[in-house]
């Protein structure tokens, strides 16, 4: 009896402690990965019998709201051409309960997107380009599509697109390499003559100068077929920030991406559920958390050049 009484006295404070540990704010976003349910950063017990009474309603309301809010968010973004809140940003989907507003010059200045086939890399590139072409700010885009042109063909006739090359016309790639080299030299000369340290100073004190974004789908295949372009892209990645030239590249893995490029492609986006080792190689500290999303949406994780990480969701097939 004494032993039973002692055991009972020990269980009671432990149960009270467990109850206190289970108390947390329930105003965070709800997510479900097919195995675990999360409210914010808190994972709920796998067996619902251990859930607190209010968690059931919070989870139901959270998942229902997500299903309803995503189509509305996409429709609203389409109306404004996927432009962001700021003049130099683009709408790139949703983050938690709000809009994911992405500014390349602040988050990058260069971006590497990595993910396996089917994770939505090409769709994300199209979303980025759509937003940039809708911006009121002066901008030029060079598009290199080594998937037969399927990703970028729709933008070919836009006045802001100054060049489009595909793996079906390799001579265009050689011409683009020469053009980019000339663009780098011209911008260096302009800034030197204007006494400006970077494009921001030049625009403020001297004259208007458009930013130039080079967008590449399947970077590894591009460099495999055109190794001469590697030198030019490394120069853009190394010197482009101050000159207003930005590089955005998508690839299935880090294979084929040179060290010279990787060290300057400081902003990274990991697509879908990536292996922890791959995430570590990309510089991510936190593992991506799987999510259940509608068929027309995908999940990704951004790491900015300053090391900040966040999860977001973006649409496909828009």
Image: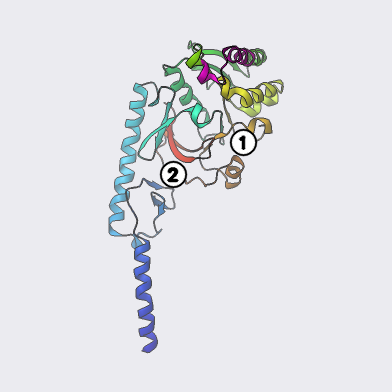
Q: Position of residue 205 (x, y in %)?
A: 49, 14
State the image quarter where residue 17 is shown. bottom left
Residue tagged 2: 291
Quadrant in which the N terminus appears: bottom left
Magenta residues span 183-202
The answer to if 150 sits in the magenta stretch is no
- The answer to whether residue 139 shows anywhere in this view is no
- Asked whether the viewer can see residue 291, the reply is yes
**Would residue 87 appear left or right of 219 to someone viewing this image?**
left
Q: Quadrant of the C terminus?
A: top left
Q: Earlier in the sequence, mark 2 or mark 1?
A: 1
- Look at the numbered disc 1 and give the secondary structure of its residue: loop
Q: Secondary structure at mark 2?
A: loop
The disc label shown at residue 1, or none: none
Q: Nearer the viewer, residue 224 or 163?
A: 163
For the stretch drawn in magenta, the main secondary structure is helix
Q: Magenta segment: does it hold 199?
A: yes
Q: Which residue is mark 1?
A: 253
Mark 2 Cα shell of 10 Å, populated few (<14), some (14-19), many (≥20): many
Q: CA distance from mark 2 to mark 1?
A: 21 Å
Which residue occupies 34% across, 40% down? 66
Residue 85 location, quadrant: top left
Give the colour scheme shown: rainbow
Outermost residue toward the bottom? 1
């Amino acid at each position: 009896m004494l032993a039973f009484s002692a055991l009972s006295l020990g269980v009671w404070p432990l149960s009270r402690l467990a109850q206190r540990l289970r108390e947390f704010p329930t105003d965070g976003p709800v997510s479900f990965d097919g195995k675990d349910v999360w409210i914010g950063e808190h994972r709920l017990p796998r067996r619902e019998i251990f859930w607190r009474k209010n968690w059931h309603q919070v989870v139901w309301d959270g998942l229902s709201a997500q299903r309803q809010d995503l189509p509305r968010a996409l429709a609203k973004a389409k109306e404004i051409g996927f432009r962001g809140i700021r003049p130099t940003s683009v709408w790139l989907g949703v983050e938690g309960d709000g809009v994911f507003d992405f500014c390349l010059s602040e988050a990058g200045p260069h971006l590497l997107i990595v993910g396996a086939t089917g994770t939505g890399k090409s769709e994300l590139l199209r979303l980025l380009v759509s937003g940039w072409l809708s911006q009121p700010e002066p901008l030029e885009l060079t598009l290199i599509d080594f998937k037969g042109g399927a990703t970028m063909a729709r933008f070919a006739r836009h006045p802001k697109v100054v060049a489009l090359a595909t793996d079906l016309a390799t001579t265009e790639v050689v011409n683009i390499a020469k053009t980019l080299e000339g663009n780098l030299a011209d911008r260096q000369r302009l800034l030197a003559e204007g006494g400006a340290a970077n494009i921001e100073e030049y625009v403020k004190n001297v004259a208007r100068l458009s930013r130039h974004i080079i967008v590449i789908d399947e970077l590894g295949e591009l460099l495999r077929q055109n190794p001469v372009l590697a030198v030019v892209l490394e120069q853009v990645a190394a010197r482009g920030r101050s000159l207003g030239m930005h590089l955005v590249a998508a690839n299935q893995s880090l294979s084929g991406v040179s060290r010279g490029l990787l060290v300057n492609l400081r902003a990274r986006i990991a697509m879908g559920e990536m292996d922890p080792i791959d995430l570590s190689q990309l510089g991510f500290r936190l593992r991506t958390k799987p999510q259940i999303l509608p068929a027309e949406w995908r999940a990704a994780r951004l790491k900015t050049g300053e090391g900040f990480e966040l999860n977001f969701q973006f649409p496909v097939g828009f």
